[in-house]
Amino acid sequence: MRRLLLPLLAVAAACTVRPMVTRPAAANAPAAMPIAVPPQATNDPKAKPVEVAAKAADLIDHLGDSTATAVPVPKDAPNEGADFQNNWIFDHFGRFRRDKWAIAQAEGRHYKVLTIELADHTYRTVYFDITESWDAWKPTTPQ
């Protein structure tokens, strides 16, 4: 009975709802943008979301994080820009492995979207703007 009771108590403790802890912002911290957080489990139908301040650093879009901040690949980059992309990723993240890639288009621009696995086994998506290379590429015409 004891063998069955201990695992059940461990599972019950892991499944309990923990209250959300909010920390006061530091006096010299940059202004934070409020974000909505769902209310805690309650039976009150009038419960409203609580606004929690997000750090400004969490809201910054870094180079390569989206199509708006995509890393521009030079038109004359060798090996269709693959060497440039590999060197840029290595310089910013260290050792990595390409997991998957895709070609995307948005607002008249062309992007190469790479999902990479870093040395700590986390995944990142990096956007490269390949519009210049794309526009310069001329397909061979069949004769």
Image (tube, grey):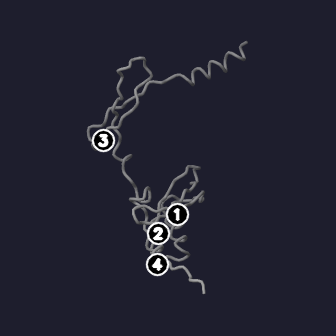
For the residues bearing labels 1 and 2, Cβ distance under 8 angstroms: yes
Identify which amino acid the numbered label 1 is placed on.
Answer: Ile
Q: Which residue is mark 1?
A: 103
Closer to the eye: label 3 or 1: 1
Q: Quadrant of the N terminus?
A: top right
Residue situated furthest top in the rendering: 1
Nearer-N-terminus badge (4/3): 3
Location of mark 2 (residue): 130
- Name the N-terminal-most of marks 3 and 1: 3
Q: Is residue 48 left or right of residue 133?
A: left
**Label 2 vs label 4: CA separation?**
10 Å
Quadrant for residue 82, please give it.
bottom right
Q: Is residue 137 left or right of residue 29?
A: right
Amino acid type assigned to the residue bearing label 4 in the image: Ala
Q: Amino acid at mark 2?
A: Ile
Q: Of label 2 and label 3, which has the lower sequence position?
A: 3
Amino acid type indicated by mark 3: Ala
For mark 3, does the 10 Å Cα neighbourhood hold few (<14), some (14 to 19), or many (20 or more) residues? some
What is the spatial separation of the Cα atoms under label 4 and label 3, in whole angstroms?
Answer: 43 Å
Q: Which residue is mark 3?
A: 32
Callout 4 secondary element: helix
